[in-house]
Image (tube, rainbow, N blue to C red):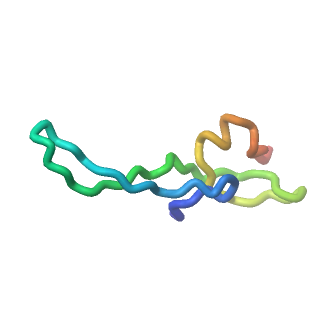
Amino acid sequence: MAKKCEICGKKPMVGNHVSHAHNVNKRRFNPNLQSVRALQAGRTKRMVVCTSCIKSGLVVKAP
């Protein structure tokens, strides 16, 4: 599955794991992506979109 939302373009961000001893390791914050059947230009298309786009109504699910 692609790691990018097809609607808003949200993609992984980079940050750090920080332990109690303040040891730092790199980590990734992946967006919560879901595969949905959505209407786009009047046609049904399978898309990979983030849950925030689904919740906000930017994605119209196909019947």
Q: Say how many tags the image has.
A: 0
**45 up-or-down from 50: above or below:** below
In this view, the residue farthest toward the right is 42
In this view, the residue farthest toward the left is 21
The residue at 40%/50% (across/down) is 29
**33 up-or-down from 54: above or below:** below
Q: Is residue 43 left or right of residue 54?
A: right
Q: Quadrant of the C terminus?
A: top right
Q: Nearer the viewer, residue 13 or 44?
A: 13
Q: Nearer the viewer, residue 46 or 17?
A: 17
Residue 31 point in image, percent of width and height? 50, 49
The residue at 75%/51% (across/down) is 38
In this view, the residue farthest toward the front is 22
The residue at 50%/46% (across/down) is 32
Residue 56 point in image, percent of width and height? 70, 36
The residue at 61%/40% (across/down) is 52
Residue 60 point in image, percent of width and height? 78, 44
Q: Is residue 55 left or right of residue 15?
A: right
In which image quadrant can residue 53 be found? top right
Q: Is residue 25 left or right of residue 41?
A: left
Q: Nearer the viewer, residue 8 or 37?
A: 8
Residue 34 point in image, percent of width and height? 57, 49
